[in-house]
Amino acid sequence: MIWITLAVLGARTAAMAANRYLDREIDARNPRTARRALAAGTLDPAVMLWACGAGLALLAVAAWQLNPLCVKLLPLAALGALFYPLCKRYTWLTHFVLGAVDSCAPLGAFIAIRGGIDLAAVLLFAAVTVWVAGFDVIYALMDFAIDRAQALRSLPSRFGERTARTLAIALHALMAVLLTAAGLAEHAGKLYALGILAAGVLLVVEIRALEREPDVFALNDRVFKANMAFSVVFLATTAVAFSLG
């Protein structure tokens, strides 16, 4: 648990530092992000490069302490963490790239414990990918106009706000299906169904928010809180389901 947690900490530090460093000029032109330290010029960009290096070093040490497969997959995880911010410059699939990078956390933890990959791990990876992509699409609504002005690719800027709202719900519905399949593949206990029920509640909350909240900033606040609550509930129900059998 300690080495898995340190691996996540290292990867997250490297990814966030790379994001801030690579996007510093884009952030400076966006009123929502212009006050970030790097964008505002109050922090030396070299600090973020050092943070990237420190995060990757911690990730490498943690992977080395886990198992050989974690070490072999380390370059792929590092590349994803460092370069996913560049995707928004080239493709509206950037949300799915971010989702895949984030889903390396549960996949990596699975590999660290089992020493390999099976169907349940793949389904979990896919579920987290579409989950993150779904709320990142909603997040991108806040920058809809500025993304178009800067010729940045996002699903809302490519297909419009209405399509983005609909797709976000579809992705989270798919997440519930994939999590159900992962539970079946792993022979989860009956209480695992409570976590799937929580995913259904999340969908209802998001549908109502997307239909009734015209302010995209208030919308993102509600969606963020709902997804945070869901993640905690799903963790708890899954842990109980597997501990009781």
Image (tube, grey):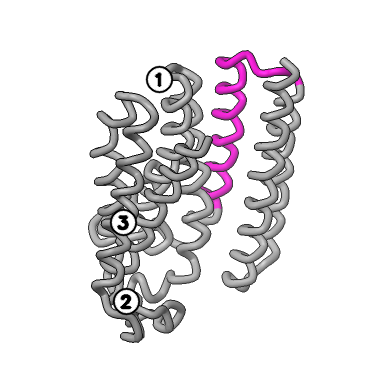
- Nearer the observer: mark 2 or 1; the answer is 1
What numbered label is drawn on residue 54? 3
- Nearer the observer: mark 2 or 3; the answer is 3
Residue under label 2, please give it. 149
CA neighbours of label 1 inside 10 A, class few (<14), some (14 to 19), many (20+):
some
Q: How many marks?
A: 3
Residue 175 magenta-drawn?
yes
Counting from the top left corner in percent of width and height, residue 227 is at 63, 51
Which span is picked out in magenta? Answer: 166-190
Q: Earlier in the sequence, mark 2 or mark 1?
A: 1
Counting from the top left corner in percent of width and height, residue 54 is at 31, 56
Residue displayed at 46% across by 19% down: 114
Q: Is residue 110 left or right of residue 98?
A: right
Residue type marked 1: Gly
Under circle 3, the secondary element is: helix
Magenta stretch secondary structure, dominant: helix
Residue type marked 2: Ala
Residue under label 1, please give it. 115
Residue displayed at 49% across by 42% down: 5
Residue 71: quadrant of the picture: top left
Q: Are marks 2 and 1 in contact (CB under 8 Å)?
A: no
In the image, 163 versus 193, the foreground residue is 193
Under circle 2, the secondary element is: helix
Residue type marked 3: Ala
Q: Is residue 199 left or right of residue 69?
A: right
Cα gap from disc 2 to disc 3, whole angstroms: 35 Å
Counting from the top left corner in percent of width and height, residue 115 is at 40, 20
Residue displayed at 43% across by 70% down: 144
**Residue 213 shows in this picture:** yes
Cα gap from disc 2 to disc 1, whole angstroms: 46 Å
Residue 63: quadrant of the picture: top left
CA neighbours of label 2 inside 10 A, class few (<14), some (14 to 19), many (20+):
few
